[in-house]
Amino acid sequence: MSAASAKKTPADAAVKPVKKRACKKAQKVATNDDANPVKKRACKKAQKAETNDDADATPVKKRACKKAEKTTKAETPADANPVKKRACKKAAEKKKVDKKPKNATRSPRPDAERRRLADRVFATLTERYPNPRCALDHQTPFQLLVATILSAQCTDKRVNAVTPALFERFPTAEAFADAPLEAIEELIKSCGFYRAKAANISQASRAIVERFNGEVPATLEELVQLPGVGRKTANVVLGNAFGIASGFVVDTHVLRLSRKIGLSDEETPEKVERDLNELVPQNDWVDGSHRLIYLGREYCVARRPQCDVCPLGEFCLKQP
């Protein structure tokens, strides 16, 4: 055997250092016992993912798990956080309030006491406003009907500024019935909601011409059948054009003041009218409504009531 062959004999002592390192690396990979720190962390992470053990999970994982559990199962108010508790209590209180009637905060007043209050109110208003009149300018019952329709959600001053030109162009129900709708709209545009009001005036005019020979009917039952005519409008026309006290006129002023003074606890015009009809003598229904309207415009203004100088200041209940 030659010396060259002897040098190439496989022996552990004669293996080159590079070969040894490669072998060790292969052994480490095979056994996975001596894996580097990065490998070890990867293995632990995989084990945690497989076992899904909450005890080995990181704090972030634990919080996520707890949050998921709270989401999946129904929470009781005791387990909710403080903000949740307050929200639950607030919702419960709101439900309780909603179940109560809107006027539950007001204790009903005896009829006798309310009648005494009404007597003082209208006696004082009669002294303050001895000769009230309708604030809407008109010459015929039909003109008053049209003006009252226009006055919905509009001031009487604005209506009185519009009606002279309107009645000059269309003086009768027949003229309104034949008029183009656009022409009526153009003349009443500044009154607001002019399209709906023009349609009601046109349709009511046709009904008056066709069913009542061009004359405004003088009964509540017939008036309320006209387009755009409700109880308030009918009571205004009957009381001021025909002298018929068919009911207490309840407009926005009367509705607000009746509740504020303490004459009624109701919230709808129909129910307030019923209360006032019982409290006020029928011969004072027409003038009494005018006097309350005067009071609302002069003293008891909605945004800035002048309670210190109001003639009812001594006995008005000043309810909200």
Image (cartoon, rainbow, N blue to C red):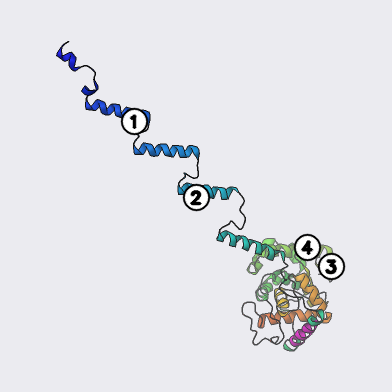
Q: CA distance from mark 4 to mark 1?
A: 104 Å
Mark 1 vs 2, N-terminal side: 1
Label placed on residue 28? 1
Mark 3 vs 1, N-terminal side: 1
Under circle 4, the secondary element is: helix
Which residue is painted at 74% across and 87% down in the image?
A: 124
Q: Which residue is mark 4?
A: 206
Which residue is painted at 66% across and 76% down in the image?
A: 157
Amino acid type at circle 1 is Lys
| Left or right: 122 as drawn, with respect to 58 | right
Q: Which residue is mark 2?
A: 63
Tell me residue 185's x, y (percent). 66, 64
Q: Quadrant of the C terminus?
A: bottom right
Asked if the residue at tag 1 contacts the one at tag 4, i.e. Cβ–Cβ closer than 8 Å, the answer is no
Amino acid type at circle 4 is Arg
Q: Count neighbours of disc 3 (C-alpha within 10 A) and say few if under 14, some if 14 to 19, many if 20 or more.
A: few
Q: Count neighbours of disc 1 (C-alpha within 10 A) and say few if under 14, some if 14 to 19, many if 20 or more.
A: some
- Name which quarter of the figure residue 117 lies in: bottom right
Q: Count neighbours of disc 4 (C-alpha within 10 A) and say few if under 14, some if 14 to 19, many if 20 or more.
A: many
Tell me residue 319's x, y (percent). 69, 78
Classify 28 as above or below 237: above
Magenta segment boundaries in residue numbering? 115-125
Q: Which residue is mark 3?
A: 221
Q: CA distance from mark 4 to mark 2?
A: 75 Å
Hey, which residue is sitting farthest top in the picture? Answer: 1
